[in-house]
Structures are given as structure tokens and as C-alpha cells.
Amino acid sequence: MKKILWLGLVLLILTPFSSALAKTTWHMHLNYPAGNFHSQGAQRFADKVKAATGGELEIVLHPGSSLGFKGPELLRAVADGQLSIAEIPTGMVEGDAPILALTAQPFISTNAFEQRLLYQLAKPVYKKTLQRFKQMTLYTSVWPFSGIYTQRPITKLSDLKGLKMRVYDGTGLAFGKATGVAARKMPFSEVYPAMKAGLLDSMYTSSVSGVDAKSWEVLKYFTRINILGPVNMVNVNLDAWNKLSPKVQEQVLEVAAAMEDEMWNLAGDMDRSSLKTLAENGLKVLDVDKNFRAELNKVGADLRETWFKKAGADAAAVLKQYNQITGRK
């Protein structure tokens, strides 16, 4: 009887320590401020994962790139295990994996539905590529399509020449070179000071980011050229993933699948509300007429042709399938 009581006491003492040892914590890099809708989505994901796994997996968020990593470094940071999990914009890591920038090519799609179709077609190629970098995607999200913020109205291609524009990826740099824009790639946190210092007079980003930055304080126009709808991957290091039990993995994947649907559906709502906020604060929102659109499409076609030569056969095969479904050339 004494042995039974002693064993019960030992188990009672050890149970909290065993539970503590079983618990896993991932620290998640986020690119955007805590108030951004992508970061808020990541918080909902983390909360749901914790609830679904009964606290076996906890994801601690670090918004605003507070862990010190920049966009182009993220693929390798997750591969090397410096980060267990990170939000990775596809267009920012093409230096390491060009194929991942397929969903960041200019004017390849015109709305979120087409962009999701493109991503779904590219998904098997993305998965194969990410395995080489020892990671997998849990869920993706998308930004509203990017336009350009300027001091003066932009109504034709020649109006772009001479602008000093902040861009965030290789596509932006290539677009700048093709149109006479002095494009500079820099973190979003550096844009406002650069505007104030006169180093920039324009930027290329979404309606949501324009609201985040209170762009109306330094710029006057937002022209909806809809160059691309950037896709973000939430990637996890495979070593970290494989340490989870099969049950926890299944629970995380179930939450992630629902989160992907939620985030893609949310982008359209965020775009509409952000456009309204821009206008309410005095920033003029301009649409593109058919002549300007034709000029932009020509630039996009030329840039894509160059990029696909670099990206290889897998990218070309995905584009061919996409064009067959959408009826594009």
C-alpha cells in the first residue's frame, strides 16, 4: 500500500514536468507590424493551433521583422534552422530560388481568383523546391494587387520616367529598369524617412500598405496598375516539423488549411476598405485606362519572357497550364 501511495506521489510530482517537456514553442518571424492583417491572421493561426493541440504547440509571434531578418534572408534562415517558422514573401527570395517568384511576375494575373489559380498550379513545384531548403508551407496568404503612390498623376507609361520609387522585390526592380523609374528595394520601415529626406518620391505597394504607412501624409495619388498580388508563405523548418507527433502535425495542418482559405478571402475585403480609407484621407485613387493598360501589358510580357528563361522548364510548364485554363496567350 505504501509503495502504491509513493508511486502515485512521484507521478503527481513528475506530471507537470513531463507536460512541460512535451510542450513545443516556435518563434515566428513576421514581416509586418502587429496591426497588419497578415500579422493578425498569423495571431489567429497561432491561437487556433494552441487550442487544437491542447497547448502541445505554441507559436510566439515576432511582428515587424523584430527578430532581425530581412526578406531575402528568410528562405535560408528557415533552412538553416535559425527560424523554426517564418512568413516568407515569394517574390523576395528569388535570389535563392527563382521559381518561387512565379506568383510575383508582373501582370500575369489580374485578380485574386486568377492569382490563387496560379498558386495552386505552382504548388507542386513550390513544394519540391522548398524541400531542397528543408522546409514546407503550412499556409499562404495574398496581398491586394500593388499599385503606385506618387506626387503627380500617372496616366501613361512615359509619366513613370524619372520617378524615385521604393519597391520590395526583383519584379519591382525589373519594372523600374524597363520604364525609366529609379527603383530602390528597401524595407517598408525605411520608406517614410526616405520620403521625408527626398530620397524617394513614390512607392509601389498595395492599398493596405498605403494605409499602414499613412501615405496621404507624403503622397497624393494611388494609381491602380495592379502589377501583382504578392503571395506570402508561412514556412516551417522540416526538422522542427518532424519533432512534432503525428497527431499534432495533423491538427496543425487542419488549422492551416482553414487559415489559407480565410486569408485569401480576406484580401478582397481589405483592399476595398483600404481604398475607401485612402480616399477619405484625401489621396486620389486612379484607375488605368485601356491605352495605359496596353502599355503596361507590353512591359509585363517582355519582363516575363526574360524571367521565364531564368526560372526554367518547371515555371514554363506551369504558365502553359495557367494560360490554357484562363485563355491567355
Image (tube, rainbow, N blue to C red):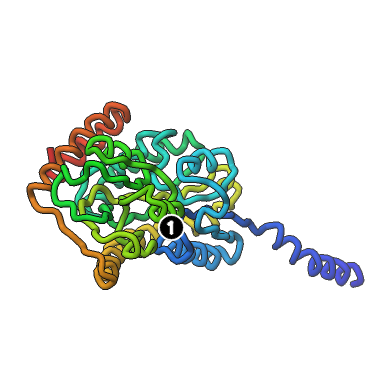
Q: Residue at x 58, y 66 (%)?
A: 54
Q: Is residue 29 visible?
A: yes
Q: The C terminus is located in which quarter?
A: top left
Residue 128 falls left or right of residue 48: left
Q: Is residue 325 visible?
A: no
Q: The N terminus is located in which quarter?
A: bottom right
Quadrant in which residue 161 is drawn:
top left
Q: Residue at x 25, y 32 (%)?
A: 316
Q: Position of residue 49 (x, y in %)?
A: 51, 62
What is the count of numbered marks?
Answer: 1
Instruction: Work out whether residue 218 or residue 190 is closer to the camera in this orientation and state it.
Output: 218
Q: Residue at x 29, y 36 (%)?
A: 174
Instruction: Work out whether residue 253 or residue 83 is closer to the camera in this orientation and state it.
Output: 83
Residue 291 falls left or right of residue 57: left
Under mark 1, the amino acid is: Ala
Q: Position of residue 273 (x, y in %)?
A: 28, 69
Residue 265 falls left or right of residue 37: left
Q: In the rendered view, would you say 207 is above or below 173? A: below
Residue at the extreme front: 198
According to the picture, the residue beneath numbered tag 1 turns out to be: 256
